[in-house]
Image (spheres, grey):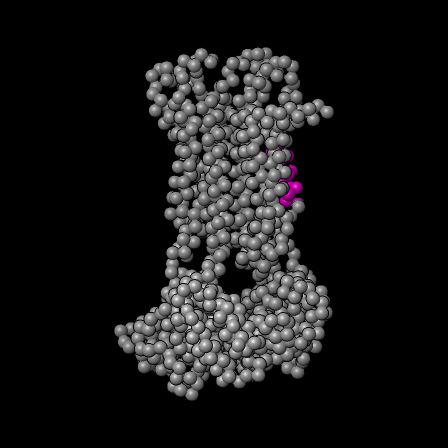
Amino acid sequence: MSFFRDLKVAIRSLARVRALWITVAVTLALGIGANAAIFSVVRGVLLRPLANRDENRLLYVRQSAPGIGVDNATFSVPEIKDIGAGLKTINEVGTFSAVDFTMLGLGEPREIRAGVVDGNYFEVMGLHPVLGRLLNSGDDGPNAAGAAVLTYRYWSTSLHSDRGVLGKTLRLGSFEGTRSAVVVGVLEPSVPYPVETEMIANVVTSPHHLSATMVTGREHRMTEVFARLAPSANLEAARAELKTVYAGMVSAHPETYKTGDRYTIEVTRMHDQINSRANIILWVLFAASGLLFVIASSNVANLVLARTVRRESELAVRSALGASTAMLRRSLLAEGLVLCGSGALAGVAIAAPMVSVLSRYASQFSVRALDLSLDSSMVWIGVALALVASVFLAFVPRLPSADASKGLGLSSSTRVSSGSGRRLRVFAVTQITASFLLLAGAGALLRTLLVLEKTQPPFETAHVLAVNLPVMSYGRTPEQVREFYREAQRRISTLPGVQHVSTSFSVPWRDTRAQSISLSFSLEGARRENGQDDPRARFRPISPGFFETMGVPILEGRDFRDSDRDGAERVVIISQSIAKQLFPGREAVDRHLQWSDPVVKFIGISTEPRRIIGVVPDIDDENIIPLPAMTVYQPSEQEGWSGRLFVRAQNDPYALVPAVVRTVHEMSADQPVERPSTLEDVRGEVMTPDRLNAIVFGGFATLALLISVVGVAGVLAFSVSGRTREFGIRMALGAQPRSILTKVLLEGFVIAGIGVAAGFLIGFALERVVGKYLGQVQLPGALPLLASAAIILAAAVIASALPAARAARVDAIQALRSE
């Protein structure tokens, strides 16, 4: 019962210093809540097991060609057959190709993200249905009936978990035609990889996958490969065997795998591959939360230790009146429990909302972050740490000596022991060090964001509306499809407020899969070094008027015309980089270009010569910060595809959306019209992860800085209160208040300087250590480091101002009389 009495006394005592109580509770709450929330996200995204059966045996196989800048070249059907035959370390291989279908049969017509898989895919992935069945070997082959499996997220959100969806017949359209498929099942909740899909169908639903060029074309790569380790094999053995088999395949086909392309193969565990994008950012975020917890703990220790030292006279009186050391420690423990316990409870209360916020942030990097909840184990760890801190705060302070208990030195309550002062300064330096590390990291992210925000794209974005208008080939010939887009452009161009209308097959920054298409080509009269391979360029089919819609001038020659159709002379427009690089100081217009890439025969593009009719500035539609872009444009009326509509508006582009949708649906009620957005907003959407990084890490750094400023101010206030007699004597001997003020300010500046120096050294050491494992990690540039140091030092001087001013106002007579 005596301890409960100590708790009541502690509550009454702390109620008299509410500012201290609130500061400690809020500081601990931020540290505990942030760490519990971030650990929940890290554990849910990076550490939580996958839904896939025996995930340690599930592998992802990838080939790349660094020589031509291709990080993931996917695989062709012949390559899959070559590397999958006779493997001993791998007993099953499954394939997946990402496609976009125009779907009818489940509500409104729409474009749906889908995957086309073989009959082994679900068995290799180790997944199960929650409704119906999954695809199997019976769904393989060109004679199989069309079958589709819905993903759980699409079924539960868009279809509201409708169990009646089984057996429904869908029409799935693509550039190559339309096929029917029956919904046979719903997949269990799982991580969608390599792309987020809403449906997974068998190969027969995609006419392109059944074509001879797809089946026999070695260069026709559009398939991802997954595999399962044999029971007795390990990852290293599988990697070695695959590299041996791959090397044999490469040497057998030198015409396909050119030495300069440097084709290689790699295999990783599926779990690691899924987490690769989120891995670095979440661990860095976890480290940032750890630094915040260190800062919070140091600040709490500073505040409580300073208060305890100030109470030495009170403790001495209680000791003189008979209180034992155990009783004094118990009272300090009671106060520590009240302080840290209230902070822990507040931390638990804010942890769940923080998980919700952070999971939305992390979902920009991993779909595994969706629908996360607070990890209770981390909450209890935070509570346990708060209890440990209570014990620490009770046993670190120095209790009165035997002399003090006899009543000696009671008047010296304002004198501060050098040991206590040193400990307070160590805690303050620790806070400054951690704050500097966080601030420097946030500064680097902010600098990156500012560069992105400042960089303007080389085309109009604010007044150009991009609309997905996917191809509906059901019941239409290719010419009828082209006529539909021509008529849609004509009708929309007559709407009030519309300046220009055109089409393409990709939206800048958004349709990354389409924009990744690059092809090798040869040019008549172009300058080339001996033995040099044909250059490569981005392939962009567009309609006449595209450059006018985008606000891009024609530098040489002319734009495409309506007469540049199928059957007319084949023409192209090239980017300025091609003209400068291959025709330096010469005219590029009227020369001829040919596609030399073997892939063109698989995608229906002719190798006939094409006359260059124009040159335009480089348009980098892939990167926020534009880079030189080797691009070849050709009229989609001759070859290529449409699917994306661009409308240049006089005023607000979004005001045109209802009229555009109505106009298209008047032409075809089944035609999907989706994702209307200005290019400016598309760009903003792509930049969202960078903005979130800057906001989140900037928030951590700001909190850390505020807590550190409180810590420095507390240390100096404590120092001033303990040196009142010293300052009184100095001023009695003639010292000017200005010198006292300068001395205290300098003390704060030195504390901050030591912390900044320590932060730089620790950051440099961490960069060297972590860089061995994560090549992307590097120190921020000089500007973020210098700016962070300046902010820390300025904040320390500001924090020192109030204690310094109080020291300068010490009355020498009163200070000496108080002793």
Measuring from the top left, give residue 208's x and y in whole percent: 56, 79
Q: Residue at x 63, y 38 (%)?
A: 345
From the viewer's perspective, is residue 807 above or below residue 628? above
Residue 421 seen in the current view: yes
Measuring from the top left, give residue 634's x and y in whole percent: 41, 78
Q: Quadrant of residue 474?
A: bottom right
Q: Residue at x 55, y 17 (%)?
A: 313
Q: Residue at x 65, y 68 (%)?
A: 150
Residue 384 falls inside the magenta stretch: yes
Image side of residue 172 versus residue 525, left or right: right
Residue 205 falls inside the magenta stretch: no
Measuring from the top left, give residue 277's x and y in whole percent: 53, 58
* Quadrant of the snapshot with the N terminus: top right
Q: Residue furthest left?
A: 585
Q: Quadrant of residue 196?
A: bottom right
From the viewer's perspective, is residue 413 above or below residue 516? above
Q: Residue at x 61, y 59 (%)?
A: 271
Image side of residue 303 versus residue 229, left or right: left
Q: Residue furthest front?
A: 496
Q: How many marks on residues? A: 0
579 vs 702, nearest the viewer: 702
Measuring from the top left, give residue 705's x and y in whole percent: 47, 39
From the viewer's perspective, is residue 86 above or below residue 655? below
Task: Report the magenta residues as a range.
Answer: 377-390
* Magenta span: chief secondary structure: helix
